[in-house]
Image (cartoon, grey):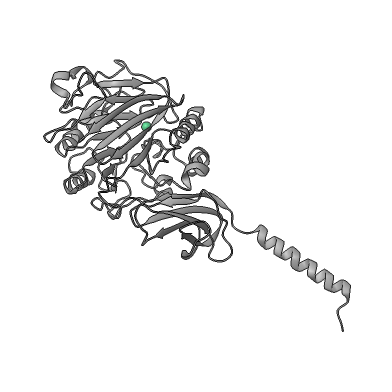
Amino acid sequence: MKPSRISLSYLLLLVVLATCRVSAQLPQVVRGPYLQVVTPTSIVIRWRTDVPTDSRVQFGASRRRLSQAVTGDSLTTEHEITLTGLKPATRYAYAVGPKTGKLPKDVDQFFQTAPAPGSTDFARLWVLGDFGCSSQTQYDVRDQIINATRDHRPDVWVMLGDNTYNVGKDEEYQKHFFAHYQSQFFKNTPFYLTPGNHDYGGQITNLNIPYFKNFTMPTKGEAGGVPSGSESFYSFDYGNVHVVSMDSYGRLSDGKRMYEAGSTQIDWLRRDLAANKQPWTLVFWHHPPYSKGSHDSDTERLMVSIREQMLPILEEYKVDMVLGGHSHVYERTHPLKGHLGKNDTFDPAKHIVSAASPDSPNRYKVGQNGQGIIYVVAGSGGQLGGQSPGYPLKSAVYSNNKEGGSLLIDVKNKWLEVRMIGTSGQVLDQFTIEK
Ligand SMILES: [Fe+2]
């Protein structure tokens, strides 16, 4: 029997409806894409979908020429694709999605690989601490960085811990972390981070936290530095800057906290710093050795232990700067050496090394022999305020617990400049180091 016109139309309608239904079920990207472990020749791209799919990243010289692709076969909602064989200091456009079909293109979806190791070209780091809380301060800090970097976007982004509040749950990352930086930063600015006590939810022995699931670290030395074999601590090179990230909170699988004698973190740190060939060395972890902000390094046992046990190692290997958060303020010390006691034991004549000249107090010149370490607390990237008895630190050149902000660190060859950009857009603190 021949099908009637009506039944043919009905069949056509069913096909159209079925197609609509399929397209309505296309997987949606609900997190990211975001960029991890940037190296001169590789990068990790991650994103989350609402339903499990396979994975594909298309990439190339421009949005119109996404000529290469890397795919993943496993069906997952947590997509993680590593691109390799890239050129150093080169910008690529990219698109993400399932293995088949047309991928949506986005003008802001690009990444730039890290410069060749040891490169002396200009590089800009953005350093942000204690931020994921959806406060006005968090939004203003972000927006002022957008304003302040119109000439040169941050090349790499460093997060100092307490990346999300209050207890580091995945939904808190979604709401207070991923929600606020996607369009301007996550899709085009690679970041490295360290965990804080809030990322751990206050449970120092719980390593099964969303922090470790959400982020990818260079554990094999693939970004420079000695392989750590652990996502809790690692290092990377960006041009001629060596950057070390350590976990100042957790009790790791060796049963020890960072500062404890014989910890795997200390053992690795020594090996990593001894092997470092770059002229600049920055170390970051969450709990600062010196603070008189919302946390007190005179009385809080963890901060005291970190100061006493870790600083001699950092001094031995001539680290330039230590970055921390935890205290919801900004504090920047003189270049220090040998100041392991409480705040009131600080003696400028004894503890300040390579002081700046009186006519340019924020210009430091580092000589061949010995240098002090500048300690910066930048814990007001979203949270703000607080002070402890004795505030401000005697060893501090500048402190601010009234206006939030974050740091831009510009490096070019033997010159390094730090600017603290406040929520008003003003540069609240600025200093340079030359070698
Ligand atoms: Fe903290």
Residue 380 visible: no
Q: Residue at x 40, y 33 (%)?
A: 130
Residue furthest toward the left? 369
In the rendering, at what x and y percent does residue 193 appear?
36, 42
Residue furthest toward the bottom? 1
Quadrant for the N terminus, please: bottom right
Left or right of residue 183: residue 312: left
Nearer-the-camera pick, 76 or 397: 397
Left or right of residue 382: residue 104: right
In the rendering, at what x and y percent does residue 181 appear?
49, 40
In the rendering, at what x and y percent does residue 393 appear?
27, 19
Nearer-the-camera pick, 388 or 325: 325
Quadrant for the C terminus, please: top left
- Count of number-bearing discs: 0
Ligand 1 in which quarter: top left
Residue furthest toward the top? 390
Q: Residue at x 32, y 26 (%)?
A: 430
- Residue 403 is drawn in which quadrant? top left
Nearer-the-camera pick, 291 or 189: 189
Q: Is residue 76 above or below residue 266?
A: below
Residue 280 visible: yes
Nearer-the-camera pick, 390 or 365: 365
Q: Is residue 266 above or below residue 38?
A: above
- Residue 412 is drawn in which quadrant? top left
In the rendering, at what x and y percent does residue 142 appear?
47, 34
